Image (cartoon, grey):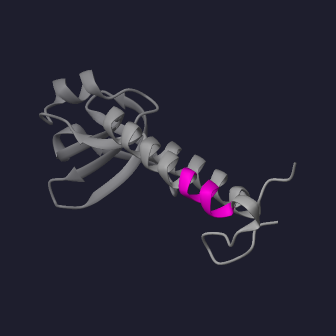
Amino acid sequence: MDLPVCRFIYIPVCLVLILNGCTSLRPLPGVDDTTIRASVNAGDKVSVVRKDGSARSLKVVRIDGDTLIGEVREGQIQIPLSDIKEMKTREFSIGRTVGLTAGLLFVGGLIEVMTSESEPCCIGITCL
């Protein structure tokens, strides 16, 4: 049994949305050295706003003394902990995951109904 063309489009799009939709950026309650050290680990993806207003998203390599060392596209950067005004960490979000999954299942059901029996597909083509 051949799968309709629409399913070949829908399935990869759903996987990308679910993988990206399961996380959200959450602000740390405080940005003092102690909170940062307790909340941030190597490998975490964070968004940092410095006291001068500049912002960077990075992957944490380590905290070395009083400096956050992170990876960005250009290489590694070092940010003094005392220079951090705001920090957000990427965390798992159960609410977004449940909502996204329910929405995708609903849309998948609509596509299934629209593509059954060689009816025109949701994007105006006849599914094979």
- Magenta residues, start to end: 109-115
Res 114 quadrant in image: bottom right
So how many labels did they put on this image?
0
Is 39 above or below relative to 121? above
Q: Residue at x 30, y 36 (%)?
A: 67
- Can residue 45 be seen by looking at this rendering? no
Magenta highlight: main SS: helix
Q: Position of residue 97 (x, y in %)?
A: 40, 38
Above or below 94: residue 20: below
Q: Nearer the viewer, residue 15 or 61?
A: 15
Q: Nearer the viewer, residue 89 or 110?
A: 110
Q: Position of residue 16 (x, y in %)?
A: 57, 50
Is residue 114 visible from the viewing direction of this image?
yes
- The one of 82 and 128 positioned closer to us in this rendering: 128
User: How far from the left and from the top, in percent, is residue 40?
Assistant: 32, 29
The answer to which image quadrant residue 64 occupies is top left
Q: Where in the figure is residue 14, as x and y percent of width and height?
A: 57, 51
Asked if residue 48 is positioned above or below residue 38 in the image, the reply reads below
Q: Is residue 112 magenta?
A: yes
In the displayed structure, does residue 79 sit left or right of residue 14?
Answer: left
Residue 47 falls inside the magenta stretch? no
Q: Residue at x 24, y 61 (%)?
A: 54
